[in-house]
Image (cartoon, grey):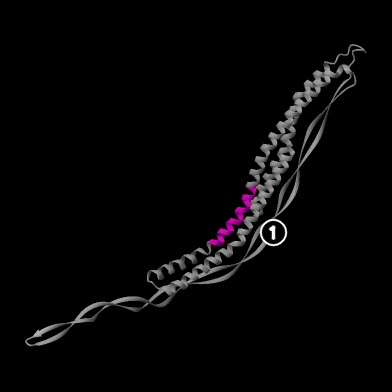
Amino acid sequence: MAAVCDAAKQSLHEVVDGLSSELSTTIKSISDRYQPEFERIADDAPDGGVLMAIDLDIDVKWETVTVSLDLPEVSMKLQEWSLDLPQVTMKDKRIVFSTTSSRMVNKKVGQYPEVHGWTIKWKDIIISVPEFFQQDHEIIMGIPEVRMDTTSFKLDVPEFVMRTQEIKFDLPQITVKSVQAEARLLKEEAEAKAAEMGKEIAAMRARVLGRGGEKVVAASNTFFTCLRTQIQMKRDETAALFEPGIAMVQQALSKLQDVSATAPADEMRQRLNELIAKKEAATANFDAAIRQIIEQEKATVDSLLRGLRGATA
C-alpha cells in the first residue's frame, strides 16, 4: 500500500517546494522592475559643488523569510488482523410445522316437523359449517448452515508523523539615508517608491500563497484519498465474503414465510440478524481506520492553511 501512494505523497511535498521558487522568482521580478526607478532618483541628486552636494543613499538589502509548514510523513505499519468469516453450506432438513386450516362438517342446527296422517315426526336440520383445526405439514428444504472460521491476514495501516517543511524566499528591504537637508524631497520620493514596491510585493505574495493553498489542499486530498482507498478496498473485499451467506439465509427465510412456517421462519430470521451483526463487527476496524485517515486529512489541511495564512500577514 505504501508504494501505491508514494507518488501522491511526493506530489504534495513538491507543491510546497514549488511555492519557494515561485515566490522568490515573482518577488525578484518586481524588485528588478523598480530598480531603475531608484537609480533614477539617485541620479537626480545634483553634484555641482560643495554647496550643491546632496548625500542620498538608497540601500537595498535582501532578507530571507522562512515559512514553516507541517506536512505528514506516513509510515505503513504491517498489522496482522484476525476476522471471523462465514463458511456456508446447504443441508436438506425435514421441517414439520402446523397451520390453521378449515374443513366443512355437517352439524345439526335444529328440527322441523313432518306430518304423516295423524302422526307428527320431527326431522333434524343438517347444514355444513366450517371447522378450524391445526393441520400438520412436512417439507424438506435446503437450510443454510453458517460456520464462522477465523481468518488471519496482514494489512498495511498508515501511521502519521508531522514533519516541518520550510518555504524560504527573499524580500527586499529598502533603506533611504540622507545627511543633507536638501535631499529631503528626493528621500521622500525614494521612500514613497519603496512603499509602493512593498505594497505590490505584499499583494503578489498573498496571491501566490493563496493559489498555493488551493494546490496544497488538492494534493493533500489526492494523497489521503489514496490511503483511504486502500483500506476501503480491503473492507469491501471482507464485506463481500458475507454476502453469499446472507443471501442464502434471506432466501431460506422467504421460503419459510411463504409456507407460513412461523417458528422455523423466526429461527431463520434470528440467524440472519446474527450474520449481519457479524458482518458489521468484521468491518468495524476498517471503518475506524478510514475515520482516522479522514480526521488526519482535516488536521493536515487546517495546519497547512494556517501556516500559509500566517505567511501572508
* Residue at the front extreme, as displayed: 118
Residue identified by numbered label 1 = 77
Dividing the picture into quadrants, the one containing residue 108 is: bottom left
Q: Dot 1, crowdedness within 10 Å: few (<14), some or many (≥20)?
A: few
Left or right of 44 on screen, residue 302 = left
Residue 196, given in percent of the width and then of the height, sits at 75, 25
What's the magenta bit mostly, secondary-structure-wise? helix
Q: Nearer the viewer, residue 245 or 281?
A: 281
* Residue at the bottom extreme, as displayed: 119
Vertical placement of residue 249 versus 289, above or below? below
Dividing the picture into quadrants, the one containing residue 176 is: top right
Q: Is residue 29 visible?
A: no
State the residue at coordinates (53%, 61%). Answer: 240
Vertical placement of residue 101 versus 62, above or below? below
Residue 235 in the magenta stretch? The answer is yes
Residue 8 in the magenta stretch? The answer is no
State the residue at coordinates (41%, 73%). Answer: 262
Q: Nearer the viewer, residue 112 or 77?
A: 112
Q: Nearer the viewer, residue 9 or 300?
A: 300
State the residue at coordinates (61%, 56%). Answer: 231
Vertical placement of residue 251 versus 169, above or below? below
Residue 151, given in percent of the width and then of the height, sits at 60, 68
Vertical placement of residue 273 versus 207, above or below? below
- Which amino acid does the dot numbered 1 rest on? Lys
Q: Nearer the viewer, residue 7 or 208?
A: 208
Dividing the picture into quadrants, the one containing residue 42 is: top right
Residue 39, given in percent of the width and then of the height, sits at 81, 20
In the rendered image, which quarter contains the C terminus? top right
Q: Which residues are magenta?
A: 222-239
* Residue at the right extreme, as displayed: 50
Residue 163, given in percent of the width and then of the height, sits at 75, 49
